[in-house]
């Protein structure tokens, strides 16, 4: 098992390194730069060139890339080209909102998807099972921002049970208010993910229902629900794998959700900084996201090896 972890660690690090190259080059391929953003389109070519030289953008791209990579290895995410603020401090402050939002929506979707997938596998072809799978199709079809607006209308405007948006200035020191402000965004972000994971959970459960192990359990007198519980690990393994792959997608969803609910999270900050061409900040934030995905994938692979020992062989 240790050899598998080391192999995945090496593969993941290579993937992270390639991702840094792609991030760096794609940002430089965008039209405009931070010099144009700061000085405006009416700035003289000399003024633009002087500011680019001050930022070091006149140096070869490979030199700029390796300087950034060395700083990353040292744990230095750099400073914003516009505000001069520490990127690490900005990321940490924004993760206070985005990280709980993503983690909570992921845990909720995994738990719900595993339960629904198992139940619908036992009720294949029945009205309730067909209805649930139809709802999962709707979950995939409805855009996140539409669902977010609908949740605001029902729970914030119509019944005034939860806030329509915003986050407490005191942050998590106002725990109850912070928690209430994330409930609707969490539900909006978890909806599509739950719908996707349910289909994988149901597929795994159906495979077990058609297996000899299930038929043997039924033959010795175990109830259908009880017999399927023995496949909980097999159902959960693919769900965890797909959920870990969707983390990057959740960041994209968080951008939409944070915009609709006016949350000061990582996604909303990233959109603003991309528009401002704040290269140092954007590339470092994207590196943090890629690294988070890498760590999560490694953890999920290890957990899946525990759930299904055949994977470790």
Image (tube, grey):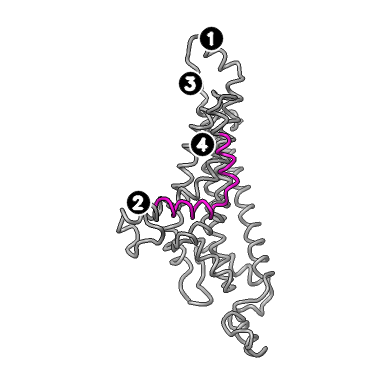
Q: Is residue 51 above or below residue 202?
A: below
Are the two marked residues, 1 and 4, in contact with CB atoms closer than 8 angstroms? no
Q: Residue at x 63, y 52 (%)?
A: 15
* Image location (x, y in percent) of residue 244: 55, 44
Closer to the N terminus: mark 2 or mark 3? 2
Residue picked out by circle 1: 219
User: What residue did someone put label 4 on?
Assistant: 113
Is 292 or 277 nearer to us in this picture? Answer: 277
Mark 3 and mark 1 lie on one chain; the one further toward the N terminus is: 1
* Most distant residue in the top direction: 220
Q: Is residue 123 magenta?
A: no
- What residue would you read off at disc 3? 225
Majority secondary structure of magenta residues: helix
Helix, strand or loop at label 2? It is: loop
Q: Residue at x 42, y 63 (%)?
A: 93
Q: Which mark is residue 161?
A: 2
């Amino acid at each position: 098992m240790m050899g598998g972890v080391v192999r995945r660690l090496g593969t993941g690090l290579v993937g992270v390194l390639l991702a840094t190259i792609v991030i760096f080059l794609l940002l430089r391929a965008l039209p405009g730069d931070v010099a144009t953003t700061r000085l405006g389109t009416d700035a003289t070519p000399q003024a633009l060139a002087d500011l680019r030289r001050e930022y070091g953008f006149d140096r070869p791209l490979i030199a700029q890339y390796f300087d950034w990579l060395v700083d990353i290895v040292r744990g230095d995410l750099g400073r914003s080209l516009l505000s001069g603020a520490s990127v690490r401090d900005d990321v940490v402050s924004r993760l206070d909102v985005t990280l709980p939002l993503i983690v909570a929506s992921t845990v909720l979707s995994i738990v719900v998807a595993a339960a629904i997938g198992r139940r619908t596998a036992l009720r294949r072809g029945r009205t309730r099972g067909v209805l649930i799978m139809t709802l999962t199709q709707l979950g995939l079809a409805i855009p996140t921002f539409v669902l977010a607006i609908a949740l605001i209308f029902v729970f914030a405007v119509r019944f005034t049970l939860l806030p329509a948006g915003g986050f407490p200035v005191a942050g998590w020191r106002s725990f109850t208010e912070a928690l209430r402000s994330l409930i609707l965004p969490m539900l909006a972000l978890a909806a599509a993910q739950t719908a996707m994971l349910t289909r994988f959970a149901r597929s795994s459960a159906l495979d077990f229902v058609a297996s000899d192990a299930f038929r043997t359990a039924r033959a010795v007198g175990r109830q259908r629900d009880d017999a399927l519980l023995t496949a909980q690990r097999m159902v959960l393994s693919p769900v965890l794998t797909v959920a870990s792959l969707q983390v990057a997608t959740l960041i994209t969803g968080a951008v939409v959700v944070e915009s609709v609910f006016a949350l000061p999270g990582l996604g909303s900050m990233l959109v603003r900084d991309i528009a401002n061409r704040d290269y140092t900040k954007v590339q470092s934030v994207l590196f943090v996201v890629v690294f988070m995905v890498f760590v999560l994938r490694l953890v999920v692979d290890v957990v899946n090896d525990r759930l299904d020992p055949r994977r470790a062989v």
